[in-house]
Amino acid sequence: MNQQSAMTASAGFAIPDPTEIPRLEGKVSDTEWTLRKQLAATYRLCAMYGWTDLVFTHISARLPDENGEHRFLINPYGVMFDEMTASALVKIDMDGKICQDTPYFINPAGFTIHSAVHLARKDAGCVIHVHTPYGMAVSAQKKGLRRYTQMSMQVYNDLAYHDYEGIALDIDERERIVSDLGTKSLLMLRNHGTLTLGKTCGTAFLRMYFLENACKAQIFAQSVGGEEHLIEEPIEMGDKVYQQGAAAFVPGMGDNLVWPGLMRKLARTNPGFDH
């Protein structure tokens, strides 16, 4: 789907309330339904933490391959993060074709970025891409993320950079995104935003939590003036802290330590993601 087809699809198109569309539980496999609930929860958690840009960023989750086909779930264009539901999520293939009956369509820029990562990385069970003021501010800095804080050093060695190429509508950009990402799990999209991946939604979310808060702390620290006022730890210390904190991002460890509590918090403050 290109930009023009997305615009055509939306012309005169009323975006359905996601709480009013038919529930998909029992109509998809148990594995898909579980993943849908986790992904919808991730959208709402990103909204809870302020990592949203109305409807213009994306989180995706890869489904198990079926008959050799690679498919993933992504947000319906026009649904806010804080109202996302499991049944509203859209299943697409790696060509951007929608693989289910749905009243929704998708954002083509989201397809470009997320399909690139899911195709290249088998460990990319979940991919989170956001545009936050702090993440964008650091993405615009020539030196990128600095080793100013413990939080930044916990992700510093796992962070890659991709130069800005405009709104991600060019399918050819996928090759360069994948090349720049390499084997790392966090990506700074220059002049654009941030991206994290993980085998689970919980791991991808935890990585984004560390990255976004490291960016926020950096902007706060830089508010005092020039670099002469700041202490940046040497590379050796960054390496040490990265190794010390690595266990937090091992699936089944850091995510299981944090994810259940996040689910309880979500159930208290914004229930309904599991519709």
Image: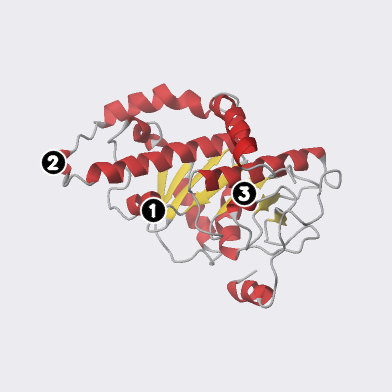
How has the structure been colored for display? secondary structure
Image point (77%, 61%), residue name: 102
Would residue 96 appear left or right of 140 to someone viewing this image? right
Amino acid at the residue labelled 1 = Pro
Would residue 162 appear left or right of 19 to someone viewing this image? left
Which labelled disc corresponds to residue 60? 3
Nearer the camera: disc 1 or disc 3: 1
Amino acid at the residue labelled 2 = Glu
Q: Quadrant of residue 202?
A: top right
Which labelled disc corresponds to residue 133? 1
Amino acid at the residue labelled 3 = Ser
- The answer to whether marks 1 and 3 mark residues whose Cβ atoms lie closer than 8 Å is no
Q: Name the residue under label 2.
A: 228
Label 2 SS: helix
Residue nearest the viewer, comparing 254 with 123 = 254
Q: Cα distance, mark 3 to mark 2?
A: 41 Å
